[in-house]
Amino acid sequence: MRSIAFVVFLSACMSHGIGTDPGDHVYDGAVVSIVLDDQGGGFAPPPPSGPCDPQVARYTVTNATHDLAWSACDVVGTSPNQTTAPRTGHRVLEASEWASLTDALSAIVVVANDGRCGADKPTFALIVNTSNDTIEYADNFYACQNQNKPLVDGDALSHAMQVAGGLAMSK
């Protein structure tokens, strides 16, 4: 009986779960993929007419293949004839690009709910997938609206979104 308890204890210690407690990191080698989801919103000028919203973007990072996929919306043309155009794609990142993106993802940590209730920036979400779990985190900037989700540091999440967006635009 003692050896069974030891095996159960050992496997619990070796399993990779997703961090949900303040101070936990949300990215490590056990992550299969991460979705950085910019849902738009906040205070911004009205977008030009067109088939998509330039405030909305989604970046999917796949760990095993170092692939970055994106779905975004560009403003095209010159005023007053501007419109929007969807932009999607994916590519395998070069080693230096992968390092900059994983550095940004590694900096994202779970934070305590401090009751913050922002209203002037886009709404960001982070969806982390491992072989065992999927969990959606919310930006702590909107903590008052996300009582049932673990929160991550909004500045680190914003930085990761900028890095992913820059890499998607660079090729």
Image (cartoon, grey):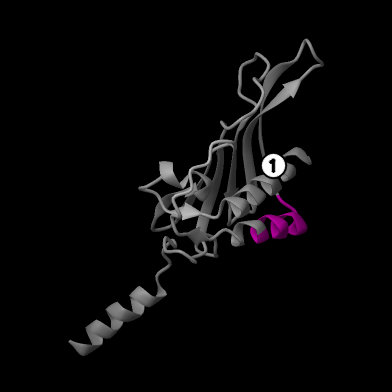
- Identify the residue at horizontal 78%, vertical 10% (top origin): 80
Q: Which residues are magenta?
A: 93-103
- Secondary element under disc 1, as helix, strand or loop, is helix
- Between 161 and 133, which is closer to the camera in this rendering? 161
Along the viewing direction, whichever of 92 and 82 lies nearer the viewer: 82
Q: At x 49% / y 59%, what residue is drawn?
A: 110
Q: Quadrant of the C terminus?
A: top right
Residue 96 falls within the magenta-colored stretch: yes
Residue 113 drawn above or below residue 85: below
Would you say residue 34 sits in the magenta stretch?
no
Q: Compared to 78, does 61 lie above or below?
A: below
Amino acid type, residue under disc 1 in the picture:
Gly
Q: Which residue is mark 1?
A: 165
Which residue is located at x 60 percent, y 62 percent?
Answer: 106
**Above or below for 161 versus 43:** below
Image point 44% across, 63% down: which residue? Answer: 19
Image position of 39 with respect to 80: above or below: below
Q: Quadrant of residue 20?
A: bottom left
